[in-house]
């Protein structure tokens, strides 16, 4: 039981990070942009915060908004200088452009900060505690609290604020939204600010537990994409639930399946956990093709 509880705590912590990544992707999707550069945003945000705290001696709570502003600026410039110049925005073209942005930001991060893993210290000044033999890190607790808080904030924002409603309208039909007076420029600015916030928090939390910042950190974002589909495209609640489910599945599979002491499932191999989340995704989609919280779009015929 202790092993199960320990793996559950670790799975929830990892799931919250996946949820933050999925939230960032979902929010940008609500503005009509498919952003495959979310991983590099997370990587650069984590590097910026670590560099400011450890090298420039900037207080942690001051470094966070500075990093968010920097990532938001990158996104806004990308939209203004690249995406806005497209007369039409085919999905495939936008995907390829954001993948190009992802590669550019990764290379830039390596050139500036180096490729070798670097000590991240403990900017949170957090430790942990043990309850009933289960080790709990404060960083994991704050990850969970932050994820749930963002979920509530985004629900209120998109449901009741005029800017959130404007973002939803722009995602459905940007031309119609512009005709009725919605400023698409403001929508995109707000979108990239939210993207910078979520990406920075995800990167910082991901680097907090091992306290080591690695250039490969951004690739974790690709492991979070199944959470977006599992929860349902365009659903912030689905992004969080999908992230939590996949985090639990991955950690529990790593702890129980394919280990040397498992006499029943050891034949699956030690790396079975890397595909366990995709198996769950396929099973869910067989029952709910649009995800747990996704809805079938109405089509006029």
Image: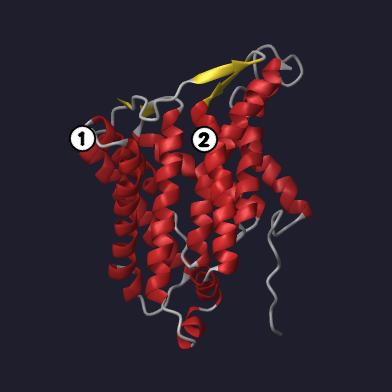
What residue is rendered at 48% in x and 70% in y? 163
What residue is rendered at 65% in x and 57% in y? 232
Q: In screen coordinates, is 74 left or right of 231?
A: left
Q: Which of 17/280 is in front?
A: 17
List x then y, in percent, for residue 142. 51, 35
Residue 60 can be seen, yes or no: yes
Q: Quadrant of the C terminus?
A: bottom right
Query: In this rendering, is residue 90 above or below 280?
Result: below
Q: Secondary structure at mark 1?
A: loop
Image color mode: secondary structure
Which residue has dot 2 on it?
142
Q: In screen coordinates, is 295 left or right of 66?
A: right
Q: Which of 267/21 is in front?
A: 21
List x then y, in percent, for residue 151. 58, 51
Q: Which mark is residue 56?
A: 1
N-terminal label among 2 and 1:
1
Query: In this rendering, is residue 74 above or below 212?
Result: below
Query: In this rendering, is residue 156 above or below 179?
Result: above
What residue is rendered at 66% in x and 50% in y? 230
- Label 1, residues with CA under 10 Å away: few <14, some 14-19, many ≥20: few
- Label 2, residues with CA under 10 Å away: few <14, some 14-19, many ≥20: some
Q: Mark 2 to mark 1: distance in Å?
A: 24 Å
Q: Secondary structure at mark 2?
A: helix
């Amino acid at each position: 039981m202790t092993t199960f509880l320990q793996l559950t705590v670790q799975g929830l912590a990892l799931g919250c990070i996946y949820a933050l990544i999925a939230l960032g992707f979902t929010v940008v999707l609500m503005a009509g942009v498919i952003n495959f550069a979310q991983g590099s945003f997370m990587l650069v945000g984590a590097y910026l915060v670590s560099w400011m705290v450890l090298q420039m001696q900037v207080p942690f709570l001051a470094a966070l908004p500075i990093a968010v502003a920097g990532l938001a600026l990158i996104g806004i410039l990308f939209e203004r200088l690249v995406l806005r110049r497209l007369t039409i925005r085919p999905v495939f073209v936008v995907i390829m452009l954001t993948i190009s942005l992802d590669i550019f930001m990764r290379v830039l991060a390596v050139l500036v900060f180096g490729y070798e893993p670097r000590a991240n210290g403990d900017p949170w000044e957090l430790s942990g505690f043990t309850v009933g033999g289960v080790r709990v890190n404060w960083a994991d607790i704050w990850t969970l609290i932050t994820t749930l808080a963002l979920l509530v904030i985004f629900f209120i924002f998109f449901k009741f604020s005029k800017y959130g409603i404007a973002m939803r309208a722009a995602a459905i039909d940007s031309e119609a939204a512009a005709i009725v007076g919605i400023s698409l420029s403001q929508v995109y600015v707000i979108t990239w600010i939210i993207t910078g916030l979520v990406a920075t928090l995800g990167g910082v939390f991901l680097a907090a537990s091992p306290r080591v910042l690695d250039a490969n950190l951004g690739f974790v974002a690709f492991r979070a994409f199944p959470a977006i589909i599992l929860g349902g495209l365009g659903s912030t609640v689905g992004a969080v639930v999908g992230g939590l489910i996949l985090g639990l599945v991955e950690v529990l599979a790593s702890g129980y399946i394919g280990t040397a002491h498992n006499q029943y499932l050891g034949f699956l191999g030690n790396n079975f956990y890397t595909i366990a989340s995709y198996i769950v995704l396929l099973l869910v989609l067989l029952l709910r093709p649009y995800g747990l919280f996704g809805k079938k779009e109405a089509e006029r015929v």
